[in-house]
Each structure stands twice: as C-alpha cells, then as structure tokens.
Image (tube, grey):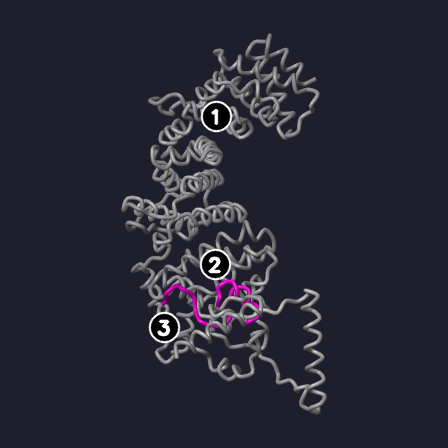
Amino acid sequence: MDEERALYIVRAGEAGAIERVLRDYSDKHRATFKFEPTDEDKRKKLCEGIFKVLVRDIPTTCQVSCLEVLRILSRDKKILVPVTTKENMQILLRLAKLNESDDSLEKVSEFPVIVESLKCLCNIVFNSQMAQQLSLELNLAAKLCNLLRKCKDRKFINDIKCFDLRLLFLLSLLHTDIRSQLRYELQGLPLLTQILESAFSIKWTDEYESAVDHNGPPLSPQETDCAIEALKALFNVTVDSWKVHKESDSHQFRVMAAVLRHCLLIVGPTEDKTEELHSNAVNLLSNVPVSCLDVLICPLTHEETAQEATTLDELPSDKTAEKETVLKNNTMVYNGMNMEAIHVLLSFMEKRIDKGSSYREGLTPVLSLLTECSRAHRNIRKFLKDQVLPPLRDVTNRPEVGSTVRNKLVRLMTHVDLGVKQIAAEFLFVLCKERVDSLLKYTGYGNAAGLLAARGLLAGGRGDNWYSEDEDTDTEEYKNAKPNINLITGHLEEPMPNPIDEMTEEQKEYEAMKLVNMLDKLSREELLKPMGLKPDGTITPLEEALNQYSVIEETSSDTD
C-alpha cells in the first residue's frame, strides 16, 4: 500500500507532494531490511519513478527525500537488476559531484545530496554485479579519489569523506584491478595516508615522529568513522605489499607506519570505537613490510628523558633498589626507546585473548604482527620478552595456570584451532630466540610438543633464524627449583615414591611384559602407532626411523 501511494504521487505529483510522501515512506521504512516479495514489482517501478524525478529541476530537500527512499529500496538485491543502468548510475554520480573535476565544494546546502547519493552508490555497488561492472566502465575509483582531494583538508565535510572512503573500500574489495589502479595510477597510498593525517590532526616533530597529546580530547565520532574507512581502504590497496623494491615505496610505508603508531596512541569517543580503530590499524600494519616497522618505536624525546631523570633524582641516593623498581615499572620505555605503541599492541592482544572467542579473526593478526616485529627488530623482541616472559621465580604452578600473559599464551598452545595454536607457539618461540631449551623452560615439553614436532626440533636445538647471543639469566629461585621441575609439565613437583622400588625382579619382569603386550595389541589394532625420531628431528613411524638409523650406521661403517 505504501509503495502504491508513493508511486502514484511520484508519477503525477509536484515536487512538494513528492517530498512529503517520500519523507513519510522513509520515516516508516528507515529500519526495514527485509521486504515483502509480493510488492517487488511495485518497488521496481518506484525506483524507476524516483530516477525520473531526480533528472528534473527540483529543490534540494526533494532530492534528499528521493535519495533516502532510493537508499532504502536499494537494500533489496532483486529490484536492482532493471534499475541499475549506465544512465541511472550517471545520475547518481552527478548528484554526488563525482562528474565535476573543477568545481569545489562550496555550497553547503548541497552536502546532504552528495552524502545521500554516495550512500545509494554504496548500497547499489555492494548489491549489484551490474553496478560493479559499470563502476569500472565509468572509472568510478578515479572520480572518488578526485572528490577526496577536494575535501581532504575540510573538516566540516567528514560525512562526504566517510562515504567516499566506504565506496572506495567496496570497489577495492570487489575488484582486484581497482586495487592496482589505486596503488599506482591514482596514488592512493599517499592520498589515503594524508586523509588519516587530517583525521588525526597529526603534527610532525621529525620525519617519522608525531606529537601525541595524551591529555587531549578523544576523536569525534565523525573523525573516528572517517579514519576507520580510510584504514579499511588502505588495507585493500596494500594487501599485496610484502616487499619494498623502491626507496620511495619504503619512505611511503614508513610514513604510513608512523601515522598508524599515532593511531594506536589515541582513543575514540567510546571504548568500542577505540577497539575498532585499533583493530583496523593492526590489520593494516600486517601489510606493511616488516623492515619499515622500526618506526613503531622511537628514541625518547628530551622532555621524556628529563622527566624520567627527574623521577629518579627525587629518590635518595641510597635507594638503589627503589630506583631499579622505577626503571623496571616504566613499561613504556626500554633501552632508551619509547615503546608505547608496542605496549598498546600487547594490551590489545591480551584483550582479544580475554574475549575467549573469534580467535582466528580477532587474535591471529596482532599475534602475527608481534611475531614478525620481534623476529626483525631486536629492541622490540627484548621489550616483549621482558613483558611476556619475565625471569621465572615461582614455578610451583603449571605454565598454563594463572592470569599472566604467559599463562594465557601457553594455554593457546593447545587450542583446538590449529592456526591459533601455531601462531601463539611461534610468538613464544621467537621471544625465546628460537631456542628449544629456553622455550621449554617457560612452557613445558607437553605444551611445546606440537611446535617442536612441526619444526623438527623434538630432539632439541634451535630454529633457522639468527639472534643475538646475549644469554638469559636465571633467578636464584629458578636455579634452586630446577632439579625438581617436571620437564613435561614445566612446574615444580614434589618427589614421588617410585612404585617399582618395592617390587621383586619377577614382578618387574611381569609388569614389563604386560605393558609390551598391551602396546602390541594397540598397535596391531591400529589404535596406537609407535613413532620415532628421524635423524633430522621430525617424527615418523618407528620402523621407518629404525631403518634410517640402520642405513646411517652402515654408511658410517663402510666409511671406516
């Protein structure tokens, strides 16, 4: 009934009547996302009627009402096939100021029309394959970049930027060709980075360092939404950027990483918005070549160094222990470097672990990022080692029991999701400089067995990557407890009585044969398969492992 009345007025009415009836329709169906199939034909005709009205010379308020209804109707994929034509797309491009290369955005009264047109284009492009093909034909990505350049430094038109960026994100998501066009032809990387700089109001203090006001106000909702859309679009543009071949590329990625560092150190209007902002920043950082991630840390400024020195000077000279505590508790500083961004990433990772769900989507990106940063940058690795794997003192509990970051990560090493447990184990392994003995000290053999088997390190040793040779120092508490630590569980156990001490030799032999028979039965029924270690440290069926060792012995004997 609503569609019939609206269609009748749209076909025959004047602009005022059309505006009123469409405003009523919009108010009633603002939250409608599922439509009645019986009215499908009426909605198609209403869409066609609205496009005919939009080509007429009508007031701006009437244009907005038409576009609002068109946006609502475009949620239904079935009606878009007949209305998604080149002519209709061009009407929306004209209203969104995407066809005009010279005109600046001066008429504030037109802004609502531009925003609603962009919203309609977002829905139509997302829901219609025909619209996606027409977007390529009409070179929509280039037009969107041109509009972005018009409003790049105009803070009062954030809504236009936001939906322009959202449409750019959708296009680059749906078409791999557009990603390449954005990256190279349209210079999308510096353009989108500048959009982020504008949203964050960044003031540079050095080439890759920005001033961060920790006491400043949070980002506004509009600035936050705009930044999130820019981050998502940048992710698509850089999704294949694993290697840097040119100095200009390296510089651009370092600038972007510096902007993302700033992003991690600021907050949005709400806690949820801050998490969403940081989540998208983490995803984008995963696309940055690891050699460019050194800008996430920076030397302390003169003010920060002076503040740290003042804090120490306030303590009496004989309070050496207290001074050491102050230095140790300053978790944002390591080796003269500001580690705020890395600390934020670590806190973000812990929050994602505490959520207890969606680990693959929510946790693995930040864990992977921290792993690669630790592998490539010594200061980052050593800082994270201090935070995640501090020197062991209390070893009475199992490594997976407790509420520290180490405990949480060790629990993930036996997670049911293979990808989650692999990246958690890899992160801890890298923090231990890929040394098996160091990893086992913090996790126990049982928790680390999966990683070691996959890497062929069950017999011990270290990984393939090179790390500095500085040695870990054990605490006196750990040294005293070490002889009684169970290597499998990784914690201190009281000596248990040996059950075979009171057996006679005959009883021992009987129990041994009983065990052999049980294992033989399980093996024959294929419920259990005896495995052995090959010379390269990987596991294989026992017979194959024995054969390989026999070949090695024969070869050695022949050589002798």
Residue 112, position in %: x, y?
Answer: 48, 25
The residue indicated by pointer 1 is: 133
Q: Secondary structure at mark 1?
A: helix
Crowding around mark 1 (Cα neighbors within 10 Å: few <14, some 14 to 19, many 20+) is: few
Splitting the image into 4 quarters, where does residue 492 fall? Answer: bottom right
Q: Quadrant where the N terminus lies? A: top right
First in sequence: mark 3 vs mark 2: 2
The residue sitting at 54% across, 51% down in the picture is 362
Crowding around mark 3 (Cα neighbors within 10 Å: few <14, some 14 to 19, many 20+) is: few
The boundaries of the magenta stretch are 445-467
The residue sitting at 35% across, 56% down in the picture is 294
> Residue farthest to the front?
558
Q: How many marks?
A: 3
The residue indicated by pointer 2 is: 346
Question: Can residue 478 be seen at all in this image of the molecule?
Answer: yes
Residue 475, position in %: x, y?
Answer: 46, 79
> Is residue 453 one of those drawn in magenta?
yes
Q: Secondary structure at mark 2?
A: helix
CA distance for labels 2 and 1: 42 Å
Check disc 3 and give the amino acid type.
Asp
Which numbered circle lies on residue 470?
3
**In the visual, does 405 lie left or right of 142?**
right
516 to 347, vertically: above or below: below
CA distance for labels 3 and 2: 24 Å
